Amino acid sequence: MSDEVGTPEAEAEPETIDESPSLYERWQAIQGDEKTVAAITILGVALAPFLLVTLPEMLGFPRSYSWYHSLVTLTLIWGIFALGYDLILGFTGLLSFGHAMFWGVAAYSAGIFSANVTGSPIAMVLVGTLMAVLLAWLIGWISLRRGGIYFAILTLAFGQMIYYIFLSPLGNITGGENGFNGVEVGKLLGMVELGGAVPFVPPMFVDSWMYVFVGAAMVAAVVVGYRILNSPYGIVLRAIRENEQRAEFVGLDVWRYKLMSFILSGAFAGVAGSLYVIQRSYVPIENTLYWTVSGDIVVITVLGGVGSLFGPVFGAGLYMYVANIVSGIPVIGDFWHMILGIVFIGIIVLMPNGIWGRVDWVRDRVADALGGDN
Amino acid sequence: MNIVGEVVVLLVNALQTGAIYVLLAIGLSIILGTLKFVNFAHGALYVIGAYLGLVITQQISISNGLLADWGYPTLGLEWGFVAALIIVPFLVFIVGLAMERFVARPFYDRPDTDQILVTFGIAIVIQELIHATIGPRSYKYEIPNELFGTIPFSGPVGVPFSTVTMDVWRVWVIAITAVLVIGVYAIVEYTDFGLVVKAGTRDPEMVQLLGIRITRPYLVMFGIGAGLAGVAGVVGAPLSNINPEIGMTILVPAFLTVVIGGVGSIRGAVLGGSLIGFVQVTLISLGSVSLGGISFNFTPWAQVGIYVLAVVVLLTRPEGLLGSEEVGA
Amino acid sequence: MSAILETDDLVKEFGGLTATDHVNLTINEGELLSLIGPNGAGKSTLINLITRMLEETEGDIRFEGESITSLTPHEVVQRGIGKSFQTASIFPELSVKENADIAAFAAEHGSFKFNFLTHRDSYPEVEQRTLDTLEAVGLRDQKDIDAGELPYGDKRRLEIGIALASEPSLLLMDEPTAGMSPEETEATVDLIEELQEEMNLTILLVEHDMEIVFSVSDRISVLNRGSIIAEGTPDEVQGDPAVQEAYLGGVEL
């Protein structure tokens, strides 16, 4: 700790010039870091079906406890949703209880679009995401006027409002409580049937183009997410979370950053919701707009590890496995939701600084991803 | 006159619907305003009240749950409705005490979001507990009409629908709610206990420095709020189905009532609840309305209407219609 | 010397209480003006009015000739008024460097940018500003430590550093030595003096420690019950009977 400013100046100056890396070196460093993350994600996504579905089967693992292909796909979809959700919860510190509305509105938009315009999966995702982003802009603009708990209550209220709007007044378009049935998913890029097998790739690795499509989206989500965290937004959002007043007094337009963060998370939810419809070819209202979806994403993100990059994805995997497979186990199975709830409570209680416990997300998650898997 | 009859019935229905929300909102509002605690598990208190009431009042058959598996195909005491009305609030009051002591108290100094998350977790766990033990089935309360009856309103000859009936039961709900609200208001305004609670809202440190232990009044206040939620469960449930999920679904209108009426204000809760009840019932009753060839069906918007109301209030008068930091005002 | 900040009949009422009573304050460019007064005099309110955390009831505030009453707090900072808080208001879970980075980004990029897809390392000018700031408050060597783990004195320096990063023309310092040990206080005072000389910074200092006030100030304004009761050089203020009365039983001059 140096008390005086003047004295070390003579030493400081040459140090300043030397320490600051050259532009090229900096570029290399960025590239290396981001390339690593991308590579790990691609590897993880590529190997997941094999490690989770095929390998256990080959090793004689009981079928009823085993992952299946579409579940792995669903996990990635929820993983994308959770990644975006962590952006506002973990990094910005905002608790939204209505995020189902972005996922759901995207799902309905994509589905209805496919029935009336074109079933191109890419177009569906674009339309769904666009609707989600617009909605997030509107809802965020209204809800962020007040902070803290009012934001949570408002987002919960809006989420429910949209559920009820899609259920009844718009029932003619949306199909009401029966969901929307007219989804028509077309060929990817006009060439490839999503349900079809991938040529030259044995099914033990990847069972269909659908997985490739979703997997690619997952990789893109991780890369974009990582870039956002490494951008100025990465520290600005965390600063807002830790000391909003100070962030304002440093000259940052805190409100606009919160809104942007909310919109970005809505975009991720939109992509995920659109993919959900593409995978299911149907839009059920209960699994898209009902508050349970909003609750689920909160639980998933917290379980996986708030404030980390890959954490929420693991949370999605854990949740999907427990909800779909453990739930089928006799006796304990009925309690899956309750057990997860208890674990959820445990996590919140035990983190002394609240759930904003600091996680060295780059190093640890990378190490975990290399060692373990989804 | 028929119009009068219909309006009276509408008002009664509105007030009665609102009464449920008022009961929930008072507890929620005081806990939020005084204890500065966000309780997302308040709905769980409601659903506990509903099920306890169900089980005390009548006998239900259960399946698909642990209790069924352990050889209890039916469950119930059949002591009747009045018994439930007296016993349930006390039971839920005790649950509320436990909740304050073990959930709320450790979290008073934690950020709001943590409070929301942990109470949300509790709400889920309670919901699942009911789901697992009693089962996911929906139950229907039998409205004790033999006990309370109905009143017919007759209208003039020649008008279609010459009689309109009104459930006396609904009037009873309003009456019970009114008594309880006045009771709580009186406690807060006119007792030493209420004084401590109000002072604690303004300046908890000062109260403690004066040597008054703030924990006891907080505990009791939480319990009272819980008891009210329990009553809401008992009287509110007959009008809809009872299943494990109703705790969470009632949470939103309850919070909206608090937000509209103003945090920490008992009168605000009454106003907010009444407004919401009014909006909901009016929209349902309006049904399809035709104006100059254009017809609009209001009924499907009944649920949406209350959210619109909440948003309007929040944007124009953020502290709520009667909001202030003082309890009881 | 020209005035860098002027308040014009500034009034702030809270219900029945008048916290700021027709205050006409002038701060001249390059000077260090201290604002003193007994507790409850309205010093914090005045500061909060200038930073726009509070809306005035009446009156105007002009910074560099232009009224700032319609600006939001972050806009005021961007205009050139920095504030250093009474508590060590930093970002505890970020590293020291990241704390300075945020201030540097805000200074270089303004209040908002859509740059969520640009890597932080591609902004060398921000990097430079960060390092210079840390250098100025002597925390360069600790740049990778979590800010929350710094000793209190260092946290306060970081705090001042964050305020300085935006290169403000006017720095408001709200009791910067509160809670500091004598050594830390001395170091902070040295820092303040150096900042004033080297950066030609105009400083509005709110302080209770009269020794400091009388040694560093160019001018002093004395506030009591919301209005200015005396103004002038340290000598003038020291001898003013109104000031002595206001401090009856308070700090010795």
Image (spheres, coloured by chain):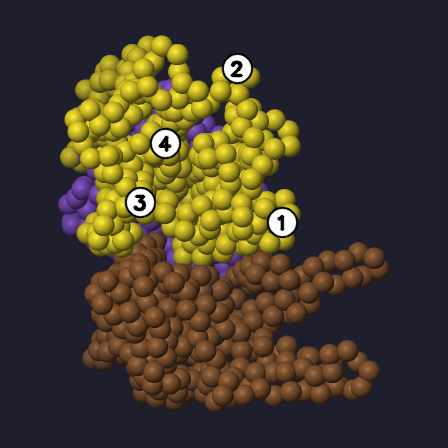
Chain colours: A yellow, B brown, C purple
State the separation of the CA atoms marked 2 and 4: 22 Å
State the separation of the CA atoms marked 3 and 4: 14 Å
- First in sequence, mark 3 or 1: give its number: 1
- First in sequence, mark 1 or 4: give its number: 4
**Residue at the spot of label 1:** A170
Q: Residue at x 31, y 45 (%)?
A: A323
- First in sequence, mark 3 or 4: give its number: 4
The tag on residue A70 is 4
Q: Can you tell which quarter of the image residue B201 is in?
A: bottom left
State the separation of the CA atoms marked 1 and 4: 31 Å
At label 1, which amino acid type do we have?
Answer: Leu
**Residue at the spot of label 3:** A323
State the separation of the CA atoms marked 3 and 1: 31 Å
Q: Is residue A212 visible?
A: yes
**Residue at the spot of label 2:** A191
Horizontal side of residue C242 vs A354, given as left or right: right
> Are there few (<14), some (14-19), or many (20+) residues within 10 Å of tag 1?
some
- Residue closer to the observer: A198 or A314: A198
At label 2, which amino acid type do we have?
Answer: Met
Q: Residue at x 84, y 59 (%)?
A: B292
